[in-house]
Amino acid sequence: RARHQFRQFARRAHLKFCPGCTAMIEKTCGCNIMQCPCGRRFSWGSAESVEPCRTLHWRERGLRYWGTTCKGCSHIATAKLIAWRVLVVGPVALVGGAAVAAIVLGTAVVAVVVPAVVCTGMAIAYEPVRLLRQEKHNRFIKAMRDTPSKLGAILWTIFWEDD
């Protein structure tokens, strides 16, 4: 019974062993660089836990909410991490990717539709003028035809072309 209570305390307090003298150490605040009374300096994250941790931790750098487990974590913590990534992070990334795809596709549709809508009436109105001037091509029809490809080239440069 006493051993079970100690194990629960060690897990909750997140006690770790000093790599130098194997004394149990509790971190209550501050940075991750520790110094044991024996004089050994070490990183809290690299120290071995007294009792395997069951907690999912947030990363300090990079993709914070991708999550991580500590050194010597239990199988429960690993299962929590997998569940977190599959059930929360994965769908969020999928929805975010779909939103980006919708924005790009919507921009492409606008790039095709707007010139057609704007220039059609002008092309019809300009046609008698073009005939009187004896011009070879209707400049508004040319704008309808060229604008989507120019906008497409700009979008390609912005989103996909490497520097």
Image: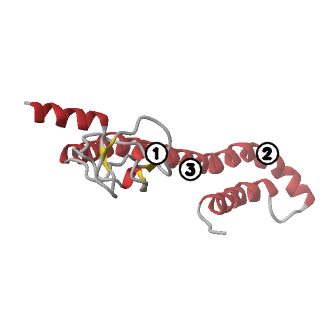
Q: Secondary structure at mark 3?
A: helix
Frontmost residue, 58 versus 134 = 58
Q: Name the image quarter holding residue 21.
A: bottom left
Q: Quadrant of the N terminus?
A: top left
The residues tagged by marks 2 and 1 sit, at their Cα atoms, a distance apart of 53 Å
The first of marks 1 and 3 along the sequence is 1
Residue lying farthest to the right in this orientation: 133
Which residue matches tag 3? 104
Which residue matches tag 1? 64
Frontmost residue, 61 versus 121 = 61
Q: Nearer the viewer, mark 2 or mark 3?
A: 3
Indicate the amino acid at tag 1: Arg
The residues tagged by marks 1 and 3 sit, at their Cα atoms, a distance apart of 27 Å
Frontmost residue, 141 versus 3 = 3
* Left or right of 9 in this view: 158: right
Residue at horizontal 76%, vertical 47%? 124
Marks 2,3: beta carbons within 8 A: no
Residue 122's disc number = 2
Looking at the image, residue 135 lies above or below residue 90: below
Residue 5 at what x, y percent from top left? Answer: 15, 30
